[in-house]
Image: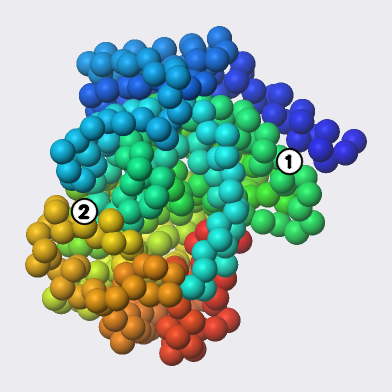
Amino acid sequence: MSLERENSIMIDLFSAKNSCWDYQPKRAPYFTPEAIVLTKGSCQTAPQRDFVQAICKVYPQARVFERFGTSHNRLDIGGSDILETHYKGKKTLVLGVHKSALRFSDEDGNDCPNYWHFSPYSFCPYDCRYCYLAGTPGVKFSPTVKIFVNIGEILDRIACVASKLTVPAAFYLGKLQDGLAFDPLTGYSRLIIPFFAHQKNAKLTLLTKSANVDNLLDLDHNGHTILSWSLNPGEISSLFESNVPLPDERIAAMRKCANAGYPLRAVIMPIIPVEGWQNIYTRFLEKFLVSVPLERITLGQICSYFGALQLTERKLGKNNAISKMLEKGKSKDGRIRFPVKLRIEVYRYLIDKIKKLRPKLQIGLCLEEADVFNALEMEDSIGRCNCVL
């Protein structure tokens, strides 16, 4: 039997008529929408209509608007300025279809290895003051949280690409969204993880700040799903993260997933060198690295766009701890970062601590430039970061 035929059968087994749409939606923690908007394609089939109706029932206080002639990314939600629109978007749940949900990233100007990524969701309900997603083009022009109901089509497209792979490759969930924040509402993990468990060369890498892992624990993942959490010490989280699970809650979720046999990674990002950062991050690493069996850790610092940093300053004030340290100009990839000298100092300190605590742990850097890898003598680590195998 051909691989294409096997993948076709897999999609049938996990079609909209089966496990995904039979799932009973539950409230997603940290998310209470004021409006739910049904956009183009969201109610085309009976299973989709049932699924959409079930989600709406979970939030009876939300006003439901039918905009079936409008695409999910063409919705005007109003707002007098960027901050008001930003927060209004985080209270607006858009249900629609995404016809180009699978993409290959094309980062240029840094040493990102580029990879396949896909989007059953868009944006995030959390309120991190440094959020880079808020400055990406898709969110800037359509700043709502979205769930795409054509999950079967999305997986079908992944299966088509996967059938042509000759070597293992990662498909990343977390580039343009939080990978698990809405999982209690959709149950998509119970569809996506078994799908990847049956793939020969395709594996799932998933990034989240969520502690919503109950749907994952009884699944047969076959080691083909790599779960990763974005973390910072509690002192940093309390300054720059709001409406989000505490770091200790995320770590507890990681331990549950470790017990269920999932490969685990962590992304310490963005590292923000506030006063006393050496002691803050040392205490965090000493506790964290002995409590979770990581296979890889990736470090990263602020690497954001101007629009996102505008929101940071609206939330924290222009004289905030992040803005005070930023370089004046853009890097080659259009992002704004801390000065190279500071970044190297921070990385060198933390890498030294990690190597003393876990000498064999793989260490990567996220969205960094060649000069930084060279200064740290980490050229061999380029392309060995969170999103790829």
For mark 1, give the secondary structure: helix
164 with respect to 91 (left or right): right
For image coordinates 15% across by 38% down, the residue present is 80
Mark 2 residue type = Leu
323 with respect to 134 (left or right): left
On the image, the x and y values in percent for residue 211 come to 35, 42
Q: Could you say which disc has been placed on residue 331 in the image?
A: none
Q: Quadrant of residue 37?
A: top left
**In this rendering, is residue 233 above or below 149?**
below
Determine crowd level at label 2: few under 14, some 14-19, many 20+ residues with C-alpha closer than 10 A.
Answer: many
Residues 10 and 284: in front is 10
Q: Is residue 287 visible?
A: no
Residues 289 and 151: in front is 151
Foreground label between 1 and 2: 2
Q: Is residue 153 visible?
A: yes
Residue receiving disc 2 = 311
Q: Quadrant of residue 76?
A: top left
On the image, the x and y values in percent for residue 353 come to 35, 80
For image coordinates 48% across by 30% down, the residue present is 148
Residues 160 and 282: in front is 160
Q: Could you say which disc has been placed on residue 160 in the image?
A: 1
Q: Quadrant of residue 240?
A: bottom left
For image coordinates 45% across by 19% down, the residue present is 69
**In this rendering, is residue 119 above or below 59?**
below
**In this rendering, is residue 66 above or below 263?**
above
